[in-house]
Image (cartoon, rainbow, N blue to C red):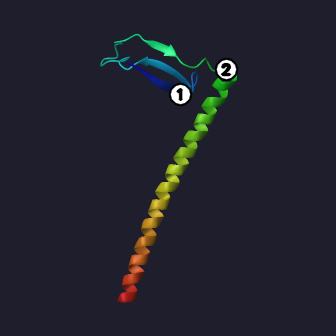
Amino acid sequence: MAILKTLWTSINAGRRFMGCANIRSEGGKRQCGFFTWVDPPICARGTVIIPGLLCKLQARNEEVASLQKRLRFMVVVVVLLIFFIFFWLMW
């Protein structure tokens, strides 16, 4: 059974290929030799641009994760403040 995968290396960024589902077995030995490219090779300009775009995307994803973590922290702080103010007023 063949599976479709996409490579994200700098030379073949975004290039799809089909290969056997058992292309690698334990120990790194090939069980099946089936491999074929689905997409044509990327042009020279694409091999320069795509890795740069992937780096920018990764940086943005890391920034979003950091902001989400910060937001969760701030929500906890606000909830605790509301909790303490409520009980202080009830005292």
- Residue 85 x/y as whole percent: 42, 81
Q: If the image is split into quadrants, where does the C terminus sit?
A: bottom left
Give, as a three-letter code, the residue at label 2. Answer: Cys
For disc 1, the marked residue is 8
Q: CA distance from mark 1 to mark 2?
A: 15 Å
How many numbered dots are placed on residues in this image?
A: 2
Q: Which picture quadrant has residue 44?
A: top right
Judged left or right of residue 1, residue 44 is right
**SS for callout 1:** loop
How many C-alpha atoms fall within 10 Å of the one at disc 1: few (<14), some, or many (≥20)? some
Identify the image quadrant of the N terminus: top left
> Furthest-right residue in view?
45
* Residue positioned 46% across, 13% down in the render: 35
Query: Residue, x 43% and y 75% (percent of image)?
Result: 81
The three-letter amino acid code for the residue at tag 1 is Trp
Query: Percent from the top left, x then y, of residue 13?
Result: 57, 26
Please, what secondary structure does the residue beneath circle 2 have?
Answer: loop
List the single residue furthest toward the top: 33
65 and 4: which one is in front?
4
Task: Return the mark for residue 41.
Answer: none
Vertical placement of 24 versus 13: above or below?
above
x and y percent of residue 70 in the render? Answer: 49, 58
Q: Do the CB atoms of the residues marked 1 and 2 lie less than 8 Å apart? A: no
- Residue 31 drawn at (x, y percent): 34, 12
Q: Tag 2: Cα neighbours inside 10 Å, few (<14), some, or many (≥20)?
A: few
To which residue does mark 2 refer? 43
